[in-house]
Amino acid sequence: MFSSLAKGNLLLSTSVLPVNVLLQVLLLTVYLFIFAGTIEPVPLSVVGENILLALVIPFVLPHVTRCDIKKQNPAE
């Protein structure tokens, strides 16, 4: 949204977003060490849940919806 408002490269910003989210999740312990001065373990289940919620579900749902619409309107 902000890329299109600023007349930026929408395709590039969309393609970089999943990489950015993965790096944020994977580097969470490093950020905690830098800003809080302590290393806290992050369970793998939390990392997997965040990846699922932030990447997989938003990627799969539009494809499922598109296939469903194509089945309902085969002429288009």
Image (spheres, rainbow, N blue to C red):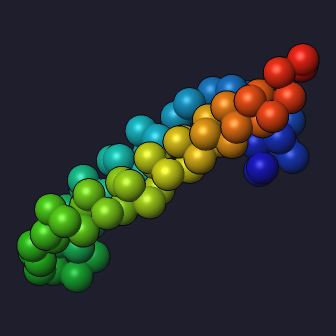
Nearer to me, 5 or 63:
63
Q: Which residue is rendered at x = 77% and y = 28% of the image?
A: 70
From the viewer's side, name the closer residue of 53 and 14. 53
Residue 28 in the figure: left or right of residue 18: left
Is there any visible trace of residue 74 in the rendered image? yes
In this picture, is 34 found above or below 36?
A: above
Along the line of sight, which residue is nearer the eye, 29 or 60?
Answer: 60
Q: Quadrant of the C terminus?
A: top right
Which residue does the image show at 36% across and 54% down from the upper left?
Answer: 51
Task: Report the front residue among 71 and 39.
Answer: 71
In this picture, residue 43 sits left or right of residue 52: left
The residue that appears at 23% across and 73% down in the rendered structure is 32
Residue 74, image x, y percentages:
83, 21
Tell me where residue 37 appears, x and y as whole percent: 15, 80
**In the image, is residue 75 above or below residue 7?**
above
Measured along the vertical axis of the image, is residue 36 above or below residue 61?
below
Residue 66 visible in the shown view: no
Residue at position x 53%, y 42% from top? 60
Where on the picture, by quarter, is residue 39? bottom left
x and y, in percent, of residue 59 in the image: 54, 41
Measuring from the top left, give residue 7's x and y in whole percent: 86, 36
The answer to which quarter of the image holds residue 66 is top right
Q: How many marks?
A: 0
Is 42 positioned to the left or the right of 67 in the image?
left
